[in-house]
């Protein structure tokens, strides 16, 4: 196992790559990329980095030249032969050849496209614009690069023994969390922590700790896998993930009128239904409000495998999903509910206690698995913060996200109000955005 403290202490050469591979990304991005490659190959989308934590002034912490070096290095990467073989031949969600040959022929020759980087008011404005399936793959590398450069800005000032103590404390914290989770009967949990990780090495350590502490689900354990494709390949575990808000946001932006707008989230899932089955048929309903989504959803969606809850108060939303399934003659005990919004051990325990046995309950544990250094340094210098990279326009039309948490809403205010009217998104309760 890598001695992370020593490795960090020795990070003194010009560039130690943060992104080591094109598949150092989340599995759902590749699944969505293939779908977009097939269904929307000519759609032009702009993505933008958005720092919700305005007090974290990234441009004052991270040297612009260093950032450009990391971005440019990521642009130089192509799939290795081994990575291509793994994607083509591995079994994902019980299915071989998940990635079609035409998509893989394109991906084998793919490199990340150009970016635009500006500095404004202490923040970096990082944008990517081009064909949707080409620019979308910048999201995870861009976030991981900014998050790790911020971490490096702190740890590079620390001495050898400071680093040893820092990582010893962080390891102890994770192991104590794992020991709590070990006591939860029937727990199923995955690593969702790529985008806001402390570092690649630290995420890999956390995955190994989860494997040892909880056991691989393939052998009866609680750990179901990681969203990170590179780590999944190297550690020979499941790569997990389905789809994200990006799909309905772009489909909705392209809608020609209010009626088409209202149907856009269901059009996304109809396209997904044609391509995937089983545990990949997971509904993500909160882009424009879960309650309205479920109220207007076509009955065929009730037959899908499950639902992912990614914003708002998770327990009441899971209860709504249970009632929705029951009203449509489905047995909730046969349905999968994945909780994935800013989770940590205490909330996982509470949700598991409330829903285990009533549904097939699963957890995607993200930032507070792979970046929990809270309280270890003065002034919160290593604490996680809320950095996202979102599609902000499609074919020149602005995108909108409402979320079940109004603090996560994004888009022009006039369009936000229009979407609220069309989707009937009212009475939402704001919650603190931790990550």
Image: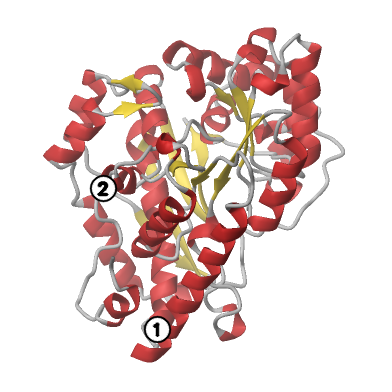
User: Could you say which is closer to the camera, residue 45 or residue 305?
Assistant: 305
Q: Earlier in the sequence, mark 1 or mark 2?
A: 1
Q: For this view, does 376 lie left or right of residue 73?
A: right
Instruction: Looking at this view, name the residue that lies furthest to the left.
Output: 81
Q: For this view, does 148 lie left or right of residue 302?
A: left
Where does the image place residue 405, in percent across and percent down from the top left?
A: 74, 45
The residue indicated by pointer 1 is 163
Q: For this view, does 250 lie left or right of residue 298?
A: left
Residue occupying the point 25% across, 63% down:
17
SS at badge 2:
helix
Few, some or many residues within 10 Å of mark 2 (<14, 14–19, 20+):
few
Labelled disc at residue 266:
none
In the rendered image, is residue 191 in sight?
A: yes
The residue indicated by pointer 2 is 234
> Which quadrant holds the N terminus?
bottom left
Q: What is the C-alpha distance between the residues marked 1 and 2?
A: 26 Å
Residue occupying the point 24% across, 81% down:
10
Where does the image place residue 72, in percent across and percent down from the top left?
A: 24, 58
Tag 1 and tag 2, C-beta contact below 8 Å: no
Q: Is residue 97 above or below residue 343?
A: above
Where does the image place residue 95, in percent across and percent down from the top left?
A: 35, 20
Q: Is residue 23 above or below residue 243?
A: below
SS at badge 1:
helix
Residue occupying the point 40% across, 21% down:
40
């Amino acid at each position: 196992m890598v001695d992370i403290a020593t490795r960090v202490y020795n990070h003194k050469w010009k560039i130690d790559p943060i992104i080591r591979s094109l598949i150092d990304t989340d599995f759902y991005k590749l699944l969505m990329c293939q779908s977009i490659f097939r269904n929307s190959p000519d759609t032009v989308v702009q993505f933008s980095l958005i720092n919700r934590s305005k007090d974290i002034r990234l441009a004052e912490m991270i040297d612009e030249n260093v950032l450009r070096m990391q971005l440019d290095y990521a642009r130089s990467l192509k799939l290795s032969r081994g990575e291509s073989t793994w994607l083509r031949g591995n079994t994902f969600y019980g299915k071989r050849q998940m990635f079609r040959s035409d998509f893989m022929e394109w991906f084998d020759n793919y490199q990340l496209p150009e970016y635009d980087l500006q500095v404004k008011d202490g923040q970096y404005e990082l944008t990517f614009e081009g064909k949707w399936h080409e620019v979308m793959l910048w999201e995870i590398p861009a976030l991981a690069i900014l998050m790790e450069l911020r971490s490096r800005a702190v740890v590079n000032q620390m001495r050898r023994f400071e680093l040893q103590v820092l990582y010893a404390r962080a390891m102890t914290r994770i192991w104590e969390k794992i020991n709590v989770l070990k006591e939860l009967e029937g727990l199923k949990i995955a690593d969702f922590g790529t985008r806001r990780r402390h570092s690649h090495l630290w995420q890999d350590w956390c995955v190994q700790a989860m494997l040892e502490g909880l056991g691989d689900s393939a052998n009866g354990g609680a750990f179901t896998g990681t969203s990170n494709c590179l780590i999944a390949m190297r550690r020979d575990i499941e790569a997990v993930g389905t789809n994200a808000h990006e799909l309905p946001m772009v489909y909705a932006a392209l809608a020609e009128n209010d009626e088409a707008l209202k149907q856009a989230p269901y059009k996304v899932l109809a396209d997904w239904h044609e391509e995937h089955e089983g545990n990949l048929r997971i509904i993500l309903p909160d882009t424009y409000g879960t309650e309205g989504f479920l109220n207007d959803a076509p009955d065929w969606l009730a037959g899908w495998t499950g639902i992912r809850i990614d914003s708002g108060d998770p327990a009441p939303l899971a209860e709504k999903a249970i009632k929705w399934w029951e009203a449509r003659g489905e047995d909730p005990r046969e349905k999968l509910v994945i909780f994935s919004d800013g989770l940590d051990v205490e909330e996982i325990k509470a949700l598991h206690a409330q829903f285990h046995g009533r549904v097939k309950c699963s957890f995607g544990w993200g930032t507070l698995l792979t970046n929990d250094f809270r309280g270890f340094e003065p002034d919160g210098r290593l604490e996680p913060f809320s950095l996202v990279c979102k599609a902000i326009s499609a074919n020149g039309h602005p995108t909108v996200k409402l979320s079940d948490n109004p603090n996560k809403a994004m888009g022009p205010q006039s369009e936000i109000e229009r979407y609220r009217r069309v989707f009937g998104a009212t009475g939402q309760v704001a919650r603190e955005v931790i990550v």
